Amino acid sequence: MITMKKLLILFTLILSLLPFQARADFAQKMNDSVFRIWSIKKIHNLHKKIPSEYYSELQKNKFIEYSKKDNDGHLDKFILLNYNQEDYFVASHGTGFFVNSHNMVTNYHVIKPILKDGEQGVIVTGNTDNIKLYNFDIIWSDDKKDLAILDVKNINAKSLTFAKPNYIKQAMPVISIGFPGDSDAIMGFNDRIGFLTPKIRRGTLASEHMQTTNNRRVLEHNAAISPGNSGGPLVNECGDVIGINTFIHIRNNNVLYSVDIRELLPVLKNKNIKFTQTNSQCSSIASSVNHIQLIIIAIVILFILVTCYLLWFITDIKKKILNGEKVVAKNQFSRMIVNNVNDRISKDETNDKTYKVSEHYPSEEFSVTLQLVENGKLVTEKTLSSGKLLLVGRGKNVDLQINHSHISNQHIKVSLNEQSVKITDLNSTNGSFINGERIIGSIFLNKSGTVFLADPKLSIQLKINLPLSSAKKQGILKPSDKSLPIIQLVEGQTITLGRSKSNDIVIDNSYVSRIHCYITLNGDGSVSIKDNQSQNGIFINTLDNSISQILMTDDDQLYIAGKDIVYSLENKNDTTKEHSSSSEKNLSSNSDC
């Protein structure tokens, strides 16, 4: 049972997941802004230097990984590419990040081979199944600061935001983003998922330094980097850039250095290069989701949960009251809800007196006369038209009131449906009966008949003004066990059978599925039975094989979920006879079991 305590636990769990969503957003932000930089070198007559099958693959796919042993027997791996109709190999690589839609920041030593050795540089995006290369111009570089700014052609990238330098503090959590060569050495170029995805490593800012040899500020940290990370951003937990990863201690992999953004920001301003900088301090692991947003999200989630709980609570109470179950109010709030539901039930029933008429319903108007007879005397008479319903009971909000202690406040409901009268017992305390059988759920009558309410001395005589030709064929599925309900069928009507109380025919047996099968009476008197993927199946005449759908005739026996539930067909095409039991609903579509 759902309780407010369980809802509060669920609410707490949802709140605990919010930072994980923020972390996912953080990773996507890095993927959209941080990319590989390749320094590529042209190879002449490559077709003579590698096996023909590799060269053919290169011409076809434009990129391949080629392995070759050196003089010492070590296996070297090369990335070969065919770019602008020329053959190249990747001589070196680094990392860069965008500060606006087309300007990228990296290390000077990443692009040094392009400046000094005549190699060509490209930005690499996409994935290994669809790599895209972008050319760039170097618009500024400084070998002392080991920084460079690029202008990337024909790209519209997403950019990172810079942190405020005064928010850079010792011991703050930091994250390195980039493409470490150590990872490439193990996974290789053919790593379809990870090759072009920047790696995220967490650590702590150890201290700030002024490196006198190069006259620059650097940040010492331990967020793991290796060759290939050069030029990638060092960010705080909100994804704001605080440094540019540059070099490591040659013997201690936990002593790592980044150039402080205070060395870069003045250059960007002097060059009139657009960039964004946050004005707030990063103070939450939820990164981009700030405190106000979290509070708003929490309030909305709590409101939705409480609303859903109240709707469920009210619906559950109403269902129990209608089913005649005792509802215990444990506190004043529950008592108020129960009293309100009790007051509304009658109004809801009487205010909804129009049935939705399906296309196959007859268009002509017809009516039925209801006569209340008590102790052999006519008490009152009412006329019910097609498409309407009438509520009978002892309560105030009914259409036909019977002031008798054995009659429930809402005892039965009468309506016209497919030129027959539908009588539904509303879980009355003392029951409703026809032909000596208690009505379970609903029955359909297409001839005048008598329904006894609670006591044989009380009766409602129903007369239906229907032409004889309008009556439909009827059939009965009779159980071998008298404790099971009789299944009353009307031509063209589909009913559900199962363990759930929402079914037209309810069989309270653990072997019967919630909605076990669908049963339809056809015009020729046969019965179509369709299994609803039940656990224990339906069978005809033998238990050897379960069936998904079958046509049942007079000589057949229907087994439901095994040998204990058996039905046989009895056609009743004489429309002057009464029907003893049927369904509560006229269904034509399946429901999940």
Image (spheres, rainbow, N blue to C red):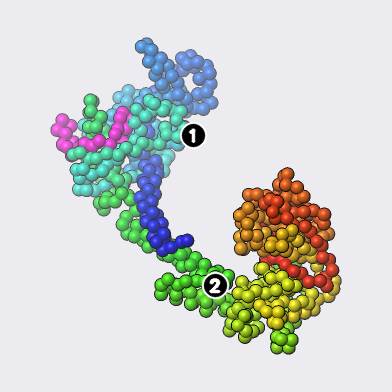
Instruction: Kindly identify which numbered label has been placed on residue 321.
Output: 2
| Residue 436 seen in render | yes
Q: Secondary structure at mark 2?
A: helix
Q: Return the residue found at the far left.
A: 212
**Horizontal and vertical percent position of residue 284:** 29, 51
Q: Secondary structure at mark 1?
A: strand
**Vertical order, 230 against 357 (above or below):** above
User: For this view, does 289 lie left or right of residue 374?
Assistant: left
Q: Quadrant of residue 101?
A: top left
Neighbours of disc 2 within 10 Å: few (<14), some (14-19), many (20+): some
Which one is nearer the viewer's eye here, 373 or 592?
Answer: 373
Q: Residue at x 46, y 17 (%)?
A: 46
Q: Residue at x 49, y 33 (%)?
A: 129
User: Which segment is the magenta one?
Assistant: 208-232
Instruction: Kindly identify which numbered label has been placed on residue 130.
Output: 1
Q: Return the residue found at the far top.
A: 71
Q: Quadrant of residue 248?
A: top left
Q: Residue at x 23, y 25 (%)?
A: 250
**Horizontal and vertical percent position of residue 115:** 31, 27
Type of amino acid under label 2: Ile
Type of amino acid under label 1: Asn
Q: Earlier along the polypeptide chain: callout 1 or callout 2?
A: 1
Q: Quadrant of residue 265?
A: top left
Q: Residue at x 16, y 36 (%)?
A: 210
Q: Is residue 558 magenta?
A: no
Which one is nearer the viewer's eye here, 14 or 573?
Answer: 573
**Vertical order, 510 against 145 (above or below):** below
Instruction: Kindly identify which numbered label has been placed on residue 194.
Output: none
Neighbours of disc 1 within 10 Å: few (<14), some (14-19), many (20+): few
For the C terminus, the image quarter is bottom right
User: For this view, does 202 lie left or right of residue 220?
Assistant: right
Q: Is residue 212 magenta?
A: yes
